[in-house]
Structure formats: C-alpha cells, structure tokens
Amino acid sequence: MITAADLHALARFMVETHGPKALGLAERAVGEMEALNERVSADHWLALRAVLADMLDGHHAGETIRIH
C-alpha cells in the first residue's frame, strides 16, 4: 500500500530528477501497467501522475499532501 506521504516523496524526487519529463514517465508507466493488466500498479501510477501534475503546476511546494 502506498501512502500519501510516499506519493509526495516520490513525486518530489521525480520532479527534482526529471523535471517536466516526470509527467511523461508516469504516463508511460500507467500504460505499461495497464497493458500488463496490473490494475493496482496502474492505479498507483495514476495517483502519482496526479501529484506530479499538481507539483509541476506549482502546487504542494513544501507541504504535505492529504488524500481524503
């Protein structure tokens, strides 16, 4: 189970490492997981993609994400 803190930490790492390309990497991972019929992994990548998109839009700078 991936937590909100895990998603936030991974998204921050991906943005620091890959910049805007991180979003494309997450999108590619979603497609790969869906092609393998790995629904849980695809859902995790979708959640990460959403956090990445928010971070790249300037949201969540230095704050902790809460998923309700």
Image (tube, rainbow, N blue to C red):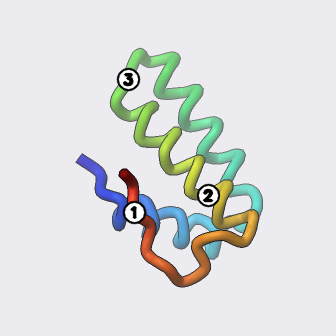
Q: Which of the labelled discs sits on residue 2, or is there none?
A: none
| Disc 2, SS | helix
- Tell me where residue 61 appears, x and y as whole percent: 61, 79
Question: Which residue is nearer to you in this view: 62 or 37?
Answer: 62
The residue at 72%/67% (across/down) is 19
Distance of label 1 from label 3 (alpha carbons): 25 Å
Amino acid, disc 1: Arg
Distance of label 2 from label 1 (alpha carbons): 14 Å
| Disc 1, SS | loop
Residue position for label 1: 66
Classed neighbour count for the residue bearing mark 2: other residues with Cα under 10 Å, few (<14), some (14–19), many (≥20):
many
Name which of mark 1 and mark 3 comes first in the sequence: 3
Please give left or right for residue 44 compared with residue 34 in the image: left
The residue at 34%/30% (across/down) is 40
- Tell me where residue 3 appears, x and y as whole percent: 30, 57
- Tell me where residue 43 appears, x and y as whole percent: 43, 34
Classed neighbour count for the residue bearing mark 3: other residues with Cα under 10 Å, few (<14), some (14–19), many (≥20):
few
| Disc 3, SS | loop
- Asked where in the image residue 60 lies, by quadrant, the reply is bottom right
Q: Which of the labelled discs sits on residue 52, or is there none?
A: 2
Distance of label 3 from label 2 (alpha carbons): 21 Å
Amino acid, disc 3: Glu
Position of residue 19 relative to residue 67, above or below, is below
Residue position for label 3: 38
- Asked where in the image residue 29 lies, by quadrant, the reply is top right
Please give left or right for residue 19 compared with residue 52 in the image: right
Amino acid, disc 2: Leu
- Tell me where residue 52 appears, x and y as whole percent: 61, 57
